[in-house]
């Protein structure tokens, strides 16, 4: 089943202060991992791929 990244990321980022940036990175991570964790934060054990993607500075890439 194909995940609806736009829908999942809108949900994930619904409480984010930097909404556009959250959507951008969530979208990248969703396309790569085919998973977005439930809720608006945390719950990353559900999506290990999403949780483990790093940015160029070694921090979490995915919101």
Image (cartoon, rainbow, N blue to C red):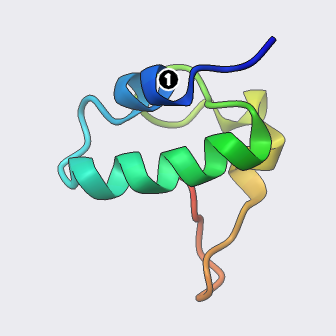
Farthest residue to the top: give it: 1
- In the figure, 12 relative to 25: above or below? above
> Which image quadrant is residue 35 in?
top right
- 49 versus 60 height, above or below: above
Q: Which residue is drawn at 45% across and 32% down?
A: 9
Q: Is residue 61 above or below residue 4?
A: below
Q: Point out residue 25 in the picture as x, y percentages from the top left corner.
A: 48, 56
Q: Nearer the viewer, residue 41 or 31?
A: 31
Q: Where 36 sits versus 4, above or below? A: below
Q: Quadrant of the N terminus?
A: top right
The image shows residue 6 at horizontal and vertical percentages of 45, 29
The percent coordinates of residue 21 (x first, y second) are 32, 58
Residue 23 appears anywhere in the view: yes
Q: What element carries label 1?
A: helix
Task: Please give left or right for residue 11 compared with residue 43 in the image.
Answer: left
Residue drawn at point x = 50 percent, y = 46 percent: 26
Q: Which quadrant would residue 43 be assigned to in this image?
A: top right
Q: Can residue 63 be seen in this view?
A: no
Q: Mark 1 points at which residue?
A: 8
Residue density around tag 1, few if under 14, some if 14–19, many if 20 or more, within 10 Å: many
Q: How many labels does the image show?
A: 1
Q: 32 or 53: which is nearer to us?
A: 32
């Amino acid at each position: 089943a194909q995940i609806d990244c736009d829908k999942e990321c809108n949900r994930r980022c619904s409480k984010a202060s930097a909404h556009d940036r959250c959507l951008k990175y969530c979208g990248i991570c969703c396309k790569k991992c085919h998973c977005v964790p439930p809720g608006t934060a945390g719950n990353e054990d559900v999506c290990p791929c999403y949780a483990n993607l790093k940015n160029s500075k070694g921090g979490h890439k995915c919101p």
